[in-house]
Amino acid sequence: MTIKVALMGNPNVGKTSLFNALTGARQHVANWPGVTVEKREGTVLHKGFRIHVVDLPGIYTFGSKSIDEQIARDYILFEAPDVVVVVADAVNPEQGLYLLMQVLELRADVILVMNAVDELEKSGAQLDRYELEKHLGVHVIPTVATKRQGVSELLNTIVHVFKSKPVHLPVKFRYDEEVEKRINELEEESSSKCENLNVPTRWLAIRLIEGDDVVKWFCDIPFQLNEEEKKRLGLLIAKSRYDHINMIIREAYSGGLSSKRLPLDEAIDHVLTHKYLGIPIFFAIMYLIFSFTFEVAQPLADGIDASIAYLAELVKASLGENWFSSLLADGIISGVGAVLVFTPNIFVMFLGLGVLEETGYLPRAAFVIDRVMYALKLSGRSFMSLILGFGCNVPSILSTRAISDPRERLVTILVSPFVTCSARLPVYILLAGLFFPKHAGSMLFLMYSASIILAALSSVLLNKVLFKGEPVPLIMELPRYRKPTVLGLLNYSWSKGRHFLQKAGTIILAASVAIWFLGSFPPGDIENTFAARLGKFLEPIFKPLGYDWRTTTALIFGMAAKEIMVSTFSTFYSTEGVEFTEAMRNAMDPATALSLMFFVLTYIPCFATIAAIRSETQSSKWTAVSILYGLVIAYGLAYLVKVVIGGWVGT
Amino acid sequence: MGWNLTNLMLSSLWFLAGVLKIAGIGTTSDIPFGIVFVVIGAIFFWGVLEDPTDHPKRLAHTYVGGVISIWLAILSVAHTLLKDSSYTNVYFELGVPILAVLSYFAGLRARKEIEAGR
Amino acid sequence: MRLNEVSDGAVVQVVDLDAPDTLRERLLGLGFVPGQTVVVGETAPLGDPRVYIVGRKVVTLREAEARRVEIKPADFIPLAMANPGRYVVVALSGGHRFRQRMANLGLQEGITIEVSYNRGAISLLVESGGRVVIGRGQAKRILVKAIGGAPR
């Protein structure tokens, strides 16, 4: 028999640790249909029952307009879990109990988990679980999820609650007279207005007062509640809940829960969000993570690179020179290998970010940098995602999952391709070195600055044109600092990084085969291959920019991955028996080269990024918008650079 | 030893390391890396500037500075081993981890005092 | 008065929320409920947002959201912000070691103290008659309530 269990709770109460402790390794990550906030599901066998656990997004209130809250609410309402487990932080119980009280208005088969009781005991306080059970009327299980403490008791209780199927709570919470009167009126109104109502009318009435539009799912006829009434009664409801919670806490807790904050946390926050030091520290930490990503992981990446080259040689040597060995070696192995090379960097970067996330620094970073993002109508959270883009746009786009506001998330995804990734660097280095040998460093700096400015301006533009949006509120909780665990870090980087292997791997495989085919057939003269014909066919479009068919072909191949451009240049320019760099210098002037650099900066980042945009937005429309927008900006900007710089050099 | 003195000494040493790294004296020049050294120096330095009666704030600078130092030291060692394995700058490349470990121990002591609520 | 108008370090009490449904529910869920005491923390380096401590939770709000919260000065203030005068100690916020040390100085919940000066460090007379000087860091962890009456 299967028991469906939903895990609910505030963000950062150790819900995910509890999920992992409950389900062990048997978990899989799936996207919600329509929206793309991760829900995690896992199954555990216990006493002959299959307990199927769903980890819902962390929320503070039970339903309203944010996407996380909707997902949690809709799951409880429409997916009919058998048992709901509400996880509260034992050290900070108020908001968790606030959520619990809202759940209890909907159903009675609820279990309360008080997590991190070890931290509570360390602070010198004690929790009386039976006192909590007496007041709340549900089973209370104290746990330490990170140490698997209390997990088997929780499983037993889940089975017990499932078998006993409580329908009514032994204790019922009542609001003020005025609120109760209105609730009764609304309950009567709804029983006449709504058919097939399968939720408690009392819950429905309270949700109505609190301003939730969920009622439209159940009733056709609108209810009349004015804003003033909703506000006044809504405050009364919240106030009575908190008064009740505070009373319960006074009864159930003994010892030092009066302590305001941990002194160490306060001290660390003072420095990390310091008026003058906060921002330099943020950049120093980001720099350290980048150095980790690109220096510590580099020997590994080089090793993979070398073994791929060796493998390609081996295949060619053992199969001889024919089309099949060329497909395997030049197409698949080199093409997929070019992407696999980045695997160590990706995992090391996520390891670094895992440290920031597990310790609790990320919300502080978002806090420190928020003012800048506010001006761009984004928030500090999207800044973190964009910063990742300097390494690679794919993890940058994947990391937007942490952004709860759907509009902000979309804008972040759409502007992230402008953040110049490490794959574009070889192209810049080649062109800057060839055409601006004395100012190559400054040219690189220019490209990076242009990249940041483009991303910022695009964000403002997108918000203005597409969304006419108001800034996203940044109501964020700064969690307690925690020591990261090795297991937690490995888990984090694996679960984030494997998307890169899965999705980018499949796409790159297909692209590599396609490019190999276009560049090899028909055999013979390279100027006659399909790739060259394609380049010549599209050449007129790029004529105003001054790009010849070779550059055009490189740009087309560069869509698969930017690094491919460099090898395409070397293939097509080296035909005349001259060094390809020499041939390039003859074929282009500096203005054209600079315009090409800008084109590379802004047009289609790579197939993997497009696939990531597609999978994260779940929308072909937005993917198309992203591609077109990039192309238009690229062409316009490249033309502008060509004309302005060309004219300036000419005179 | 007073905490002001500890903070002042550690900050001067990190500032010195930062200047050497930026200018490339006794080591290879790496400007952004050197700036990180200077930032760590600044963390300790602002500890000296804190309100003298607000003891936990001063200690906070020592603790955070110490923790970031140890991360920098790990990177610095990796950097030396992987990238700059000529060992020509042995004084500098050894000096930075030693300074970081010293900072870290100072940070741990500061942490103890903060947690004790003194 | 609105929450965005008070300075860092102030201790205030929530009176009312003037926010649309969604924002109101979110603020209520985080504990910004009328009657709740809120300690104003430090402002971010660029002037916005700011940290607010609600109970033991640390919440950040931008000025735009803080403006939605109507407040009044709290009855209780941290000793660090106390002007000379007579006060009752309401709460000692710290671990038991801190409470033990304060108890050794004669500072416990419920006792009356008299602040004689506050210039960074705070000098005060405790009920038992002893004079105590407390650093600002510790004084921030002691909540007091003014009871009027001139210093002796």
Image (tube, rainbow, N blue to C red):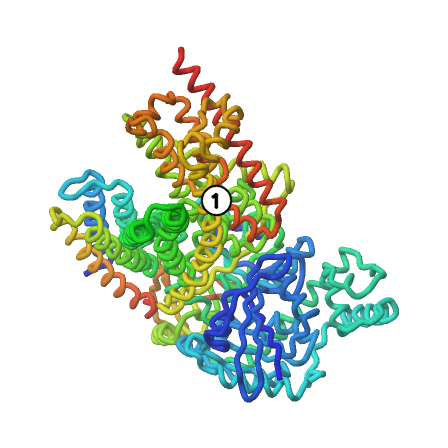
- Which quadrant: the N terminus of chain A? bottom right
Q: Is residue A44 left or right of residue A490?
A: right
Residue A292 in view, yes or no:
no
User: Can you identify the residue that label 1 sits on?
Assistant: A514
Return the residue nearer the eye: A113 or A496: A496
| Depicted A97 relative to depicted A368: above or below | below
Name the residue rendered at 35%, 30% in the picture. A431
Q: Is residue C56 left or right of residue A265?
A: right
Residue A388 in view, yes or no:
yes
Return the x and y of residue A190 as percentages of the image width and height. Answer: 83, 68
Return the residue nearer the eye: C133 or A429: A429
Name the residue rendered at 48%, 83% in the picture. A150
- Which quadrant: the C terminus of chain A? top left
Return the residue nearer the eye: A569 or A74: A569
Name the residue rendered at 43%, 38% in the picture. A519
Return the x and y of residue A594 as percentages of the image width and height. Answer: 40, 26
Q: Chain of mark 1?
A: A
| Depicted A229 relative to depicted A6: above or below | above
- Quarter of the figure with residue A213: bottom right
Q: Which residue is farthest right?
A: A192
Q: Secondary structure at mark 1?
A: helix
Circle 1: residue type:
Ala
Q: Which residue is farthest top?
A: A651
Q: Is residue A610 left or right of residue A313?
A: right
| Depicted A15 relative to depicted A515: above or below | below
- Quarter of the figure with residue B97: bottom left
Return the x and y of residue A427 as percentages of the image width and height. Answer: 37, 35
Return the x and y of residue B107 as percentages of the image width and height. Answer: 27, 61
Q: Is residue A352 left or right of residue A213?
A: left
- Quarter of the figure with residue A547: top left
Name the residue rendered at 56%, 45% in the picture. A411
